[in-house]
Amino acid sequence: MAGFNITVAGDSAINLEFGNVISEKTNGLIRAAAQTLEADPINGVIELVPTFCSLMVVYNPCAVGYDELTSQVRGKLRGLVATTGGIHRVVKIPVCYGGDFGPDLGDVAEHAGMSAEEVIAIHSGHDYLIDMLGFLPGFAYLGGLDERLHTPRLATPRTRIEPGAVGIGGAQTGIYPLASPGGWRIIGRTPVRPYDPDRESPILYAAGDYLRFVPITPQEFSLIETQVESGTYECEIVKGRATTPVQAGTAGERSEGCEASERSSADDAIAVPQTESNNNQAASSAAWSEGCEASERNASERAAVPQVDAVPQANQKEEDEDALWV
């Protein structure tokens, strides 16, 4: 039996709870469950919503009852194996760090006991798994921030943070897709639009994808911003593998794993327009997904079923509960 508990979430949804500690293992189980239920859908299921530690299954109670739904879910997810490692989508996000774009970069550097250049190098030195989307359309909760950059939130949140602001809040980092109040430390800003309601795919990425921050200059920021406004800029999406955090160094340095990923995936890049529809995007994404799913299935067949921790660590649980605050 797959390692999850089922709880009721109102009269038309259930939660599949895979643990209570945020981890890549838990995220892999949630993604695997979602992929399984999407590939072999249950009649009456309307939507699947992944979160940090659970998968919400929204259903029409007039089409399928609770008992039948939970029975089918348990049957389909029996022997579930986490989706981890392998090839995945990496969305490259250009970021201008510091200055007016990142007013809190100096504070983060001081808290970490390093230079601003070292903070930039570490922050942009590996790929971040998107655990879930929430708070705002396109707001990605990212896992994997280097512990050296963990920084407390502002004592007094700002009433307005600009769209595209890249921040650090506690043990997490992320992008504000829209203007919003917030208490994270702002270290940079991207000119791309993670969320654009006029785009064919309004949100650039999904839970289970990875983000890679790419340092740019203020001049490059202005150029990309102009291209975004005119609809000529394309956000690059590549195939990659998870990378490990880079050691402190100069700005723009990347880990060997990240460089290898970029070299191996350069010919397979998928471009996503920032403002206009791309009729080829769906076909490209579908073709990529088929190859990725095949790779993950092969890897899954060789892997052992992971065990979900029954009792969380106290400190980790407190940190996880605080993770949603922005």
Image: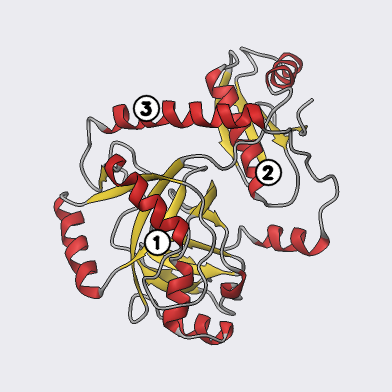
Left/right placement of residue 23 relative to residue 102 reads right
Q: Is residue 125 above or below residue 251?
A: above
Q: Earlier in the sequence, mark 3 or mark 1?
A: 1
- Residue 80, by quadrant, is top right
For residue 213, which numbered disc appears in the image? 1
Instruction: Tell me the element at label 3.
Output: helix
Q: Which residue is mark 2?
A: 26
Left/right placement of residue 155 relative to residue 4 reads left
x%, y% of residue 66? Answer: 73, 19
- Can the viewer see residue 104 in this picture? no
> Do callouts 3 and 1 mark residues in contact (Cβ within 8 Å)?
no
Label 1: few (<14), some (14–19) or many (≥20) C-alpha neighbours in 10 Å = many
Q: Amino acid at mark 3?
A: Ala
Q: What is the distance, in whole Å, between disc 3 and disc 1 at their CAs? A: 25 Å
Q: What is the distance, in whole Å, between disc 2 and disc 1 at their CAs? A: 24 Å
Q: Quadrant of the N terminus?
A: top right
Q: What is the distance, in whole Å, between disc 2 and disc 3 at their CAs? A: 25 Å
